[in-house]
Image (cartoon, rainbow, N blue to C red):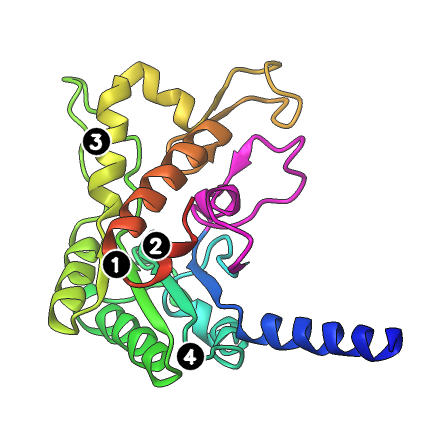
Amino acid sequence: MKKKLTLIIFFLSIITFAQQPTLFLIGDSTMANKENPDKNPEHGWGQMLPPLLTSEIIIQNHATNGRSSKSFRTEGRWNRVLNQLKKGDFVIIQFGHNDQKVNDSVRFTNPYTQYRANIERYVNETRSKGAIPILMTSIARRNFNENGVLVDTHKEYPIVVRMVADDLKVSFVDLQLLSEQLEISYGPEGSKKLHLHYKKGDQPYYPEGKDDDTHLSKMGAESIAKLAATSLKSLKTGLERYIK
């Protein structure tokens, strides 16, 4: 009798796990998990998302440093996600930072042609599996001018994401807007805490110092993750039931 009960519990756990939805994250370094999180000051906002979600959903963060909407696919990283996708899963899609690199043929995409086609393809292929795509614009860089005005660096790319979201009726989070508001709320000097700014000798991980206005500190990544989670909860895609 005990053996039968054990077997029943075992098979029920397998069925439950198979039915459990997965949230896949695809994007670049601003979203990615970082190595040595106890020592490395740099964090991706996707790295800080798991504590904000319940244990009823699995999270796979496939975002990778330096990848664009083009190179993420050509390296086979998207196939690893696509092959796992099932009905009821979710995919957050956030590219743009590296698509801008006009001197890099491996990563650069024209915003209105290649980039748009790539984003649309991610959406359509996600839907073909019965999963739910969610588009996000890139987070803002800390780029204040001498007058304290935060100046955009992404140009056409976020506009294209907005266009695709509207044309294909895709759930959408304007993380560019939310991160801009966050940067502005901290101001030109205070916003350094959201990124990686260290003088020589201040941080063992960066013995020569660091001035990085693109990538996030733990504080910055936690702040962005909270903004993302709050927005995701309001979308009513089904993902909201797994957000604390």
> Mark 2 or mark 3, which is nearer to you?
2
Which sits in the foreground, 131 or 47? Answer: 131
Distance from Cα at disc 4 to Cα at disc 1? 17 Å
- Callout 2: SS: helix
Q: Is residue 178 above or below residue 58?
A: above
Extreme residue in the front direction: 1
Q: Quick check: 237 left or right of 201? A: left
* Residue at position x 53%, y 74% in the image: 19
Residue of label 3: 181
Q: Which residue is mark 1?
A: 236
In space, the residues marked 1 and 3 are separated at their CA atoms by 23 Å
Residue that carries the numbered disc 2 in the rendered image: 240
Secondary structure mostly seen in magenta is loop
Determine crowd level at label 2: few under 14, some 14-19, many 20+ residues with C-alpha closer than 10 A. some
At 48% from the left and 77% from the top, the residue drawn is 85
Q: Position of residue 187 (x, y in %)?
A: 25, 18
Q: In terms of sequence position, does the residue under pointer 2 or pointer 3 come before the other? A: 3
Residue 154, percent across and down?
Answer: 23, 48
Amino acid tagged 2: Glu
